[in-house]
Image (spheres, rainbow, N blue to C red):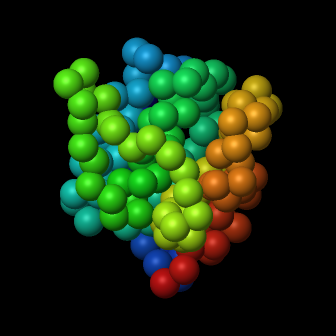
Amino acid sequence: MQISFSKREGLTPVTVMRLEGKLDASSYAAAIAAAQSAYEEGARSLLIDLSGVPYVSSAGLMALHTMSLLFAGYAMKSDETGRPVFRSVNAQNEKVVRRRVKLLNPQPPVEQVLDVVGLRQYLDIYTDLEAAIQSFEA
């Protein structure tokens, strides 16, 4: 998995996290760590570009969920395996997450998985970069 970041200006500064490769058990920890580093460096609005991700496993879904909660301001705790212990998506944190994290250009198989597990209703998905950037609130 390759991970790169860029910054864009809309109504607020937006950090674009571009993922390339499978988001699965071999790469989910690196994705979470990269997002956490961006957050610790001051990023508060995250657009995750999934156009280069052909496959997302259950570990990858957990990574997307964890990254969204990190950017919503929730502290990440780990269990003895090092995995984050966030366990659920709920209405209380959904509004904050929708303001802070959005997805860009998931490939059809990835979008289908997001839909099946319900993350499509939890995270806004865009196909246009500029529209996604402008959707973040100041």
Residue located at (26% from left, 65% from top):
42
Camera-side residue of 125 and 73 = 73
Outermost residue toward the top?
A: 26
Residue 89 in view here: yes
From this view, report whether residue 45 is shown above or below residue 114: below
Q: Is residue 72 left or right of residue 136?
A: left
Q: Residue at x 60, y 31 (%)?
A: 52
Residue 87, given in percent of the width and then of the height, sits at 44, 41
Tell me if residue 133 comes above or below residue 30 in the rendering: below
Q: Position of residue 91 (x, y in %)?
A: 58, 64
Q: In this view, does 134 lie to the left or right of 120?
A: left
Q: Can residue 1 be seen in this view?
A: no
Q: In this view, does 30 lie above or below 96?
A: above
Task: Give the percent coordinates (x, y) of residue 127.
Answer: 75, 52
Where is residue 69, by image quadrant? bottom left
Which residue: 57% across, 45% down? 49
Q: How many marks?
A: 0
Q: What residue is at 31 percent from the left and 29 percent from the top?
A: 83
Query: In the rendered view, does 78 fall on the left or right side of 87?
Result: left
Where, quadrant-wise, is the N terminus in this rendering? top left
- Is 19 drawn above or below residue 109 in the view shown? below
Q: In which quarter of the image is residue 122?
A: bottom right
Instruction: Give the side of residue 122 with respect to residue 60, left or right.
Output: right
Residue 86 spot, x, y in % from top left: 39, 43
